[in-house]
Image: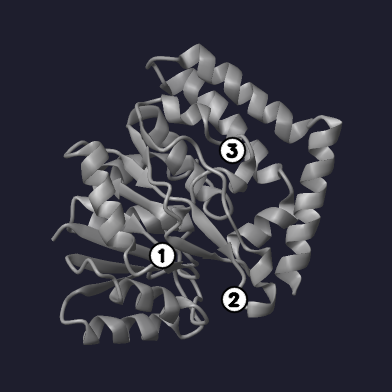
Amino acid sequence: MKISVVIQFLNSLRYLPEAVASVRSQSFTDWELVLVDGGSTDGSTELARQYERESGGQIRVLVHPGPGTLGIYSSRVWGAREAKAPLLALLDSDDIWHPRFLERQYSMYRALLGERDGMLYCPMYYWWQDSREALRGFVQTAPPSGLHEAPGWLFHAFKQGLIRTPGNSGIMVARKIVVEAGALIGTANEGSTEDQFLFAFVGLHYPVAYNPEPLVWYRQWPGSTCALQTEKGGHAFEAHHRWFIDYVTREYHGPGKEALLREARGWLREVTHPPGPVRRRLRRWRAGLARRLAN
């Protein structure tokens, strides 16, 4: 088996069927699907179990026994620990892959990274399901295509919030990296911006490659992580940047440390005290996105 697909979910009955269907429709077929249920109460657990029974062993379900619920970051790491393949493809339960996502990403990963451990990602298409909203869609901005050795990719990342950084659903990453990143459980956010902790960890220690093909439909709706982040403004990214500065200061001993710290302090200033024109653009972007999500 070449790829383990990990979908973590919590009360995702509304959109989980479309996410799973997009995995099943892949042109690349050498995969398993690990569904990680953080403790759902809406019937999505039973739906996942049905997928497992019908899959002939290609789909497995992990269910958090409680008490309470398991956060997104911890769920993702759990799925990685239980996965059987050396490569993971990550998909959020409300997003959809292009039918050739696995085929193209796997081919690009091998072309750029070979057998090395690292991460490959592609841009996401911000997608409103209602066809009346289709003209609002856009493809997120991105760094130069190709391979970036650690920690070079980080100088392209985290500068414009979620609009620039990778999305969970566009990732292909070595399983061992996500397992190692389990060391951040207890530190990483378990909700909004939780994936940014993983990406920062990867970018510091491993090569990152970029495929410019937009192969993911990133669903926009009021209950999504993107919507919650918009409501919070820059607070979640401020917390992430502060963590990153502390982590690099204490834990990172590789090349470019001082340059990274200067860059990260600049990110933090932009989040906490953006200049007038930037502040106005951010306000317009957040207000516009909030209106779109509310429709």
- SS label for mark 2: loop
Asked if the residues shown at circle 3 and circle 1 are in contact, with their CB atoms under 8 angstroms apart, the answer is no
Secondary structure of the residue carrying numbered label 1: strand
Cα separation between marks 3 and 1: 21 Å
Tag nearer the camera, 2 or 3: 2
**Image coordinates for residue 15, horizontal then vertical, percent:** 50, 78
Number of numbered labels in the structure image:
3
Q: Amino acid at mark 1?
A: Gln
Q: CA distance from mark 2 to mark 1?
A: 21 Å
Q: Amino acid at mark 2?
A: Gln
What's the residue type where badge 3 is placed? His
**Is 50 in front, or is 149?**
149
Q: Which residue is mark 1?
A: 8
Q: Earlier in the sequence, mark 2 or mark 3?
A: 2
Q: Residues within 10 Å of mark 3 (few under 14, many from 20)?
A: many
On-image quarter of the C terminus: bottom right
Report crowding for label 1: few under 14, some 14 to 19, many 20 or more residues within 10 A (C-alpha).
many
Q: In the shown orientation, is residue 237 left or right of residue 254?
A: right
Residue, x 30% and y 41% (percent of image)?
177
**Residue at x-position 59% and y-position 25%:** 264
The quadrant in which residue 209 appears is top left
Relative to 97, residue 192 above or below: above
SS label for mark 3: helix
The residue identified by callout 2 is: 129
In the rendering, which numbered label is found on residue 240? 3
